[in-house]
Image: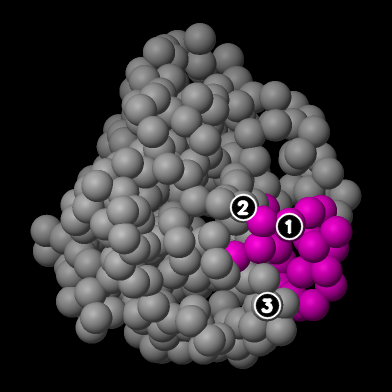
């Protein structure tokens, strides 16, 4: 059940597969006779220096993969010199995750029907020391993940959604004939969310708010108009609307629209260091990594996550050398054909 939950996409899983295939279809038109004897994968994001432009994407229920769960993931983020985005649906208290790591922690937020509970959660994560909010906007209802439906997905009784205290909001229970997570979304999360709610969140957050789940340039523009500090191009890892574009396909138009006015990130389909180069060439400032982090966590806890991030950084460094790019700033649009 846990394996299917992590790996699955919506419906026929077309978008899940397309996220990776779209990267494969892009060629890198590398430069030669460039001095790449010294290279750097470092970048800056929201005023913070990172060792590499790869963040840990928000993914739910890390203790399904390893007993240390989100604590292990956060410690590995610190080891790698990057940022973890902690999911609303985490199995570990935000205070405990912040205390376990020296890395910056961002918090991914779903907005509940109960705005009081949402406000209390925002205040709690700010007090805990999170540095930004990531508002997920592509899930008014949960996509139909047929593997979860067949498995009757639910959390084991020993696990809960650790950061919620509102009535009924801590547990994902078995649902007759379907996914318990889909029932959770339908009952508790707010499908009426609009840009006006982004205004509200930006006004109370006292933190930068990035909007995650955007695949249209006009939506990205409106997000900035309503208080967003940044945009994350995402189709929820192919888990929401099947048939939506791959994120790397959606990125160029959004990058052109935003024209560097705010941080622009991308998730979905990143599997190699060359994928990171392609995303940065098409306008992203950084990317987020989801499923590979979970595979590393399942294999070997903190060490496994650190190994995944280390592999990706070494691949990125090699790709920079072979593309004729001593630094990330040398990655330009003409590298991708």
In depth, the one of 222 and 146 nearer the eye is: 146
For marks 1 and 2, give the CA distance. Answer: 7 Å
Q: Residue at x 51, y 9 (%)?
A: 337
Residue farthest to the left? 299
The label number, if any, that marks residue 193 in the structure image: 1
Q: Residue at x 59, y 40 (%)?
A: 233
Type of colouring: one colour
Residue farthest to the front? 176
207 part of magenta stretch:
yes
- Position in image of residue 161 (x %, y %): 41, 77
Earlier-in-chain disc, 2 versus 3 = 3
Question: Is 260 above or below relative to 93?
Answer: above
Q: Residue at x 40, y 13 (%)?
A: 25
Answer with left or right where residue 149 lies relative to residue 188. left
Find disc 2 in the rendering and name its residue. 140
SS for tag 1? loop
The magenta span reads 189-212
Answer with left or right where residue 73 lies relative to residue 222. left
- Position in image of residue 173 (x %, y %): 34, 72
Find disc 3 in the rendering and name its residue. 114
In depth, the one of 191 and 324 nearer the eye is: 191
Question: Is 294 above or below relative to 29?
Answer: below
Query: Do the residues bearing badges 1 and 2 touch, measured as CB atoms within 8 Å?
Result: yes
Answer with left or right where residue 198 lies relative to residue 126. right
Question: Is 295 above or below relative to 48?
Answer: above
224 part of magenta stretch:
no
- Position in image of residue 48 (x %, y %): 59, 64
- Position in image of residue 85 (x %, y %): 48, 64
SS for tag 3? loop
Earlier-in-chain disc, 1 versus 3 = 3
Q: Residue at x 57, y 78 (%)?
A: 130
């Amino acid at each position: 059940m846990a394996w299917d939950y992590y790996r699955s996409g919506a419906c026929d899983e077309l978008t899940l597969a397309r996220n990776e295939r779209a990267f494969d279809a892009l060629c890198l038109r590398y430069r030669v006779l460039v001095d790449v004897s010294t290279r750097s994968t470092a970048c800056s994001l929201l005023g913070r220096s990172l060792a590499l432009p790869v963040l840990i994407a928000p993914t739910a229920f890390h203790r399904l993969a390893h007993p240390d769960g989100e604590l292990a993931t956060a410690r590995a983020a610190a080891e790698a010199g990057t940022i973890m985005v902690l999911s609303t649906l985490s199995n570990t208290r935000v205070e405990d995750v912040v205390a376990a790591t020296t890395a910056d922690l961002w918090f991914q937020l779903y907005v509940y029907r109960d705005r009081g509970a949402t406000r209390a959660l925002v205040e709690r994560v700010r007090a805990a020391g999170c540095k930004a909010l990531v508002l997920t906007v592509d899930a008014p209802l949960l996509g139909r993940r047929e593997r979860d439906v067949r498995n009757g997905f639910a959390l084991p009784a020993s696990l809960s959604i650790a950061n919620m205290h509102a009535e009924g909001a801590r547990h994902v229970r078995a649902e007759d004939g379907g996914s318990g997570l889909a029932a959770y979304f339908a009952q508790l999360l707010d499908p009426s969310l609009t840009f006006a709610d982004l205004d509200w969140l930006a006004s109370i957050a006292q933190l930068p708010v990035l909007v995650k789940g955007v695949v249209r340039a006009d939506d990205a523009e409106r997000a900035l108009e309503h208080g967003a500090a940044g945009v994350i191009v995402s189709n929820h890892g192919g888990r929401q609307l099947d048939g939506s574009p791959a994120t790397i396909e959606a990125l160029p138009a959004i990058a052109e629209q935003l024209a560097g006015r705010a941080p622009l990130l991308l998730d979905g389909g990143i599997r190699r260091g060359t994928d990171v180069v392609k995303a940065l060439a098409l306008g992203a400032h950084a990317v987020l990594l989801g499923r590979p982090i979970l595979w590393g966590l399942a294999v070997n806890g903190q060490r496994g996550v650190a190994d995944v991030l280390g592999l990706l950084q070494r691949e990125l460094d090699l790709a920079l050398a072979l593309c004729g790019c001593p630094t990330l700033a040398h990655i330009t649009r003409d590298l991708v054909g």
